[in-house]
Amino acid sequence: MTTYLEANKQRFLDELFDLLRIPSVSADSKFKGDVRRAAEFVRDKLTAAGLDKAQLYDTPGHPVVYAEKIVDPARPTVLVYGHYDVQPADPYELWNTPPFEPTIRNERIYARGACDDKGQFYMHIKAIEAMLATDGLPCNVKVMIEGEEEVGSDHLGTFVVEHRDMLQADVILISDTSIISNETPSLETGLRGLSYVEVQVTGANRDLHSGVYGGGVANPINVLCEMIASLHDEQGRITIPGFYDNVTELSDEERAELAKAPFDLEEYKRDLAINDVMGETGYSTNERTSIRPTLDVNGIWGGYIGEGAKTVLPSVASAKISMRLVPDQTPEEITERFTKHFVSIAPAGVTVQVKPHHGGMPYVTPVDSVEFEAASKAFEDAWGKKPVPTRGGGSIPITALFEKELGVKSILMGFGLDSDALHSPNESYGLFNFYKGIETIPYFYKHYAALKQ
Amino acid sequence: MTTYLEANKQRFLDELFDLLRIPSVSADSKFKGDVRRAAEFVRDKLTAAGLDKAQLYDTPGHPVVYAEKIVDPARPTVLVYGHYDVQPADPYELWNTPPFEPTIRNERIYARGACDDKGQFYMHIKAIEAMLATDGLPCNVKVMIEGEEEVGSDHLGTFVVEHRDMLQADVILISDTSIISNETPSLETGLRGLSYVEVQVTGANRDLHSGVYGGGVANPINVLCEMIASLHDEQGRITIPGFYDNVTELSDEERAELAKAPFDLEEYKRDLAINDVMGETGYSTNERTSIRPTLDVNGIWGGYIGEGAKTVLPSVASAKISMRLVPDQTPEEITERFTKHFVSIAPAGVTVQVKPHHGGMPYVTPVDSVEFEAASKAFEDAWGKKPVPTRGGGSIPITALFEKELGVKSILMGFGLDSDALHSPNESYGLFNFYKGIETIPYFYKHYAALKQ
């Protein structure tokens, strides 16, 4: 195995580069053809790796790629999930090298999707290839790579329901999260959910001259700012009525356990070049970004944003707002509470529209399962140390769906780093992490097969 | 005169259309060539109208066009001021017909600059042409049309100082304001000043994943919204310390006088399609938009504003903010107070930059002067009724400069309507107003010459 991995190192990387060159941005319809091209690329590589039945499944959105290798129906089955779509790459001007021309600098691969999630799911294809080419697969494997994760996996729910038998498995294995550092591997035991909405505040029926009308009528931008500002109180808590009703508060013991994960606040601030952190009173930075729900504006626009000055009161101002959820909040509940509240705080003189984008359930992985134990042992074998259990702040909405529809838990065996700049310009993925991931994955199959016997 | 105006009606309009077809957007450097082309067009038309010495005066920005006709040094001299530059036309998609292809609908000229200020200053060139072609000019006339009014007339101050002798006059006549309605002509007796700034809030050194970092660090958009929201209190008053220190409060008598101007609140709301007005407690809509200072966001942007959803905490959020000023506020004072305050309210975790764009002094015209009387009589002759004195909300910063540098007062004899959609999509100017303006202007010269004898 080690020999095979070593001998094929460069080819693995070249293939990943080919995949990274395809701008499979699912959010933007102008990349629709590229998204499909990425799916076809993945299909072909699954076949090349030795899997069977590799094919595209069309959905009303982007296609799902699926393949499998059933070595023995008596053995346990691992379902690998990943996504070949990527976040939009803009602002392009902030990239040091073009987002879809992967480049190596300082032992890191720079490209949109390098870590999220092309670099991470591709490790699985290569690990499976290596197992099949050497000692064989200790478990059956099914691979499902979707193309709509970055836009809320809108059609995967239907796909999973319609292919429940095909997807039946004992565990779902996902590499789409981070470890604490290359010195401190970790395994995520929970993820936040998501509610994403777009809001629009409309004032007059046309843009107005700010001299003629300024001071006399509602300015949609000022109103939007006031409405957004009012969504947090001075303690950094979200003011939407009932927002915290279903939040599971952790016990002091659980919080103490999570606090054991190494964290250096000064290093954190230095990395981001900020002079202070900010967040909900009474919680640590790690807690604020994992076990606490949040509300952030992800985009705002209105009025004149070109060069120079224009003295206009715009007719409309808009914002994209997302809320990260924790157990037992649900996106449906929170989207409804947000909408009701946001509409209710609109002052006279404007009208407000709230359009839900997508949502995802929060998720918690049990740490006392054989699946978690297999993942933990895999890290021990490959990294020489036990991974630290952590709670993640991101969202992989599909984990809750898998549990509901397939009755199967997911193991979040990610190999990225928080500093990989996911969703940002200059996203990257360490060469160390790429290769170490390929090395770690087969150990999971080995231990999982053994533990399930 | 009447015969001449009637006979040349269509040509006057054709010429204005040619001028309106030139996209002389001063704020956007990509239109630099078009701005110059507009200046050359104006110069040629001044010559064609019979004025002397028509030429372009280059500035570090856009050129000033000047021409004159000295009929008798013993007679009084009128200096006509206007601007051939226009506001940016975006958002283009909201125009029913293209902004730089003038179109007549419902007896109105639709085009960017139709009213502000091409349609209005061009009336003067045609009125002068008509006087010269018929009864002759009762006064000397000087015409100065600039190209930077929409971006703060940055270089006109220097031009005026450097050409003080050339520009010497007894009164300045400006058509760049509105009347109450075509049934109720009015003359503006004051204008608001302007302070325009651009602000930028920066958080981390890069865009961040809102799942990984959300809740733990300052989000520049949320912070910007909170900072903007805090600039008004619940009474709609501006919270910048000292902001109202130099505001001249009008006496009850003065307010009662202004309140006599016809105003129909229901019609105002219907025209804008809003269910209520909004503004500073204790003042009427007309007062809020004329004798009271304001603060409005004219543009805001940050984060992901494309199609779909992106879960990003942007590194930077920005806004363009303008304040309308009233006597005796000055743009220097207010820009300084704004900057100091805005920087002071920035929370830890972000940095704030404030960049001043441009400013202008508020202005008040004396109503007991022969200049005002001549303008009032001109309206009476042409419209059959006395114009109502009003206070305007817009800004023509140059009026204060003219008073300071030339020692000359300005008469604001505008013929537009508030519903002309200045600075907005579908700006228009009534054919009635264009022709009535050309008819009114010669009466001003007649009365002014007579009153000054």
Image (tube, coloured by chain):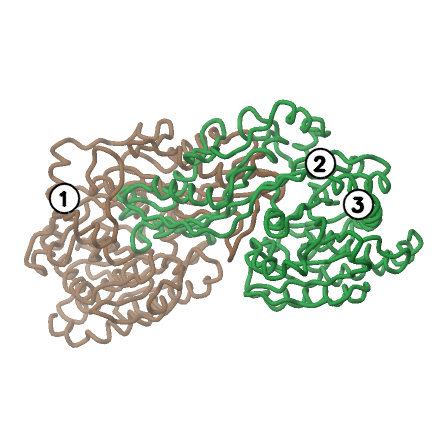
Chain colours: A green, B brown
Q: Which residue is mark 2?
A: A367
Q: Nearer the viewer, residue A374 or B199?
A: A374
Q: Residues within 10 Å of mark 1 (few under 14, many from 20)?
A: few
Query: Disc 3, disc 2: CB below 8 Å?
Result: no
Looking at the picture, does residue A358 appear above or below residue B67? above
Q: Quick check: do tags 1 and 2 share a chain?
A: no
Rendering coords of residue B123 (x, y %): 23, 64
Disc 1 marks a residue whose amino acid type is Ser
Q: Kindly tell me whether residue B404 is visible in this rendering.
A: no
Q: Is residue A154 above or below residue A191?
A: below
Left or right: B308 as drawn, with respect to A208 = right
Q: Residue at x 73, y 51 (%)?
A: A120
Provide the secondary structure element on which disc 1 rests. loop
Q: Secondary structure at mark 2?
A: loop
Report the front residue among A122 and A154: A154
Task: Please tell me the numbered disc located at residue A452.
Answer: 3
Chain of the residue under the numbered disc 3 shown in the image: A
Report the amino acid beneath label 2. Answer: Val
Circles 1 and 3 on the same subunit: no
Task: Classify mark 3: residues with Cα within 10 Å, few (<14), some (14-19) or many (20+).
Answer: few
Callout 3: SS: loop
The residue shown at (15%, 36%) is B255
